[in-house]
Amino acid sequence: MAPGKKAKVSELSGGFALKHRLMSMGIYPGKEITKLSHFALRGPVMIKVGRGTIALGHSMAGKIIVEIE
């Protein structure tokens, strides 16, 4: 997903703990997110969820399956 693009979360892959952690941050299926930026060499990914901004690790962000609008 390119920076500045909006998408809807369709699925969270991973174990129970990861799903619970993402959902506690407001990332759950059906929610709209916007990718703000990412850093080279597998650094953090910045996303906007609602009115908040979240930095996720590259592998954690890879577990969020989205539908690009």
Image: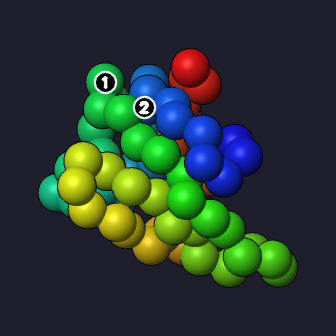
Q: Quadrant where the N terminus lies?
A: top right
**Amino acid type, residue under disc 1 in the picture:** Gly
Quadrant of the drawing holding the C terminus:
top right
Q: Residue 43: x percent and y percent?
A: 68, 79
Q: How many marks?
A: 2
Q: Amino acid at mark 2?
A: Val
| Residue 69 seen by the camera | yes
Quadrant of the image occupied by residue 67: top right
Q: CA distance from mark 2 to mark 1?
A: 5 Å
The furthest residue to the right: 41
At a point 59% along the width and 76% down the height, the residue shown is: 44
Please give the name of the residue rendered at 82% of the width and 79% of the height, measured from the top-left corner: 41
Judging depth in this view, the residue of 23 and 3 nearest the camera is: 3
Q: Which residue is mark 1?
A: 30
Q: Position of residue 26 (x, y in %)?
A: 21, 50
Is any part of residue 60 visible from this angle?
A: no
Q: Residue at x 31, y 51 (%)?
A: 49
Do the residues under discs 2 and 1 have CB atoms within 8 angstroms?
yes
Is residue 46 shown above or below 6? below
Q: Which residue is mark 2?
A: 9
